[in-house]
Image (cartoon, rainbow, N blue to C red):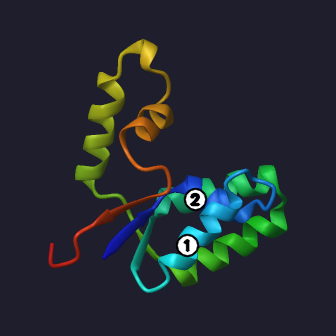
Amino acid sequence: MTVLIDSSCLVAFAFSRDKNHLAASRLLLSLRQERRIVTASVLTELFYVTMVRVNYARAVQMFAYVRTAFEIEALAEADMLRMQQIVTTLPAKAGSFPEHARRDRPRYALAAPSGPG
């Protein structure tokens, strides 16, 4: 199975006082044998948020960990177009893109069927 790991999971894992730290840790442990993908934009977000919430040293540590433990992939043009479509069609009252995304998909990871493609 291929699993796309979201920044919320990695930030919770990085920050031991996060209310979801244990759940994120267990989830990542349970997915060790799976193909785990992190987008390059998530890696950047993880570094910044970890630096702010924890400290610079932990951000560097997490950056190194994610680069070796996960496959890092760039966002394709189709991904960017889909994101633009989502954010430009959100009603003003719907809130931010992350709030919309959290309502419409699992909190930590998205699984996709393995195979060519």
Front residue (pair 12, 51): 12
- Disc 2 element: helix
Left/right of residue 2 with respect to residue 42 in the rendered view: left
Q: Which mark is residue 28?
A: 1
Residue at 67 percent of width and 54 percent of height: 20
- Disc 1 element: helix
Residues packed near mark 2 inside 10 Å, few (<14), some (14 to 19) or many (20 plus): many
CB contact under 8 Å: marks 1 and 2: yes
Residue that sits furthest to the left in the current view: 116
Decide: is 96 above or below 98.
above
Rendered-image quadrant of the C terminus: bottom left
* Amino acid type at mark 2: Cys
Residue at 17 percent of width and 78 percent of height: 115
Decide: is 84 above or below 52.
above
> To which residue does mark 2 refer?
9
Residue at 32 percent of width and 25 percent of height: 88
Residue 74 horizontal/vertical position (percent): 38, 64
Residue 78 horizontal/vertical position (percent): 22, 51
Q: Quadrant of residue 1?
A: bottom left
Decide: is 105 above or below 23.
above
Left/right of residue 15 with respect to residue 44 in the rendered view: right
N-term mark: 1 or 2: 2
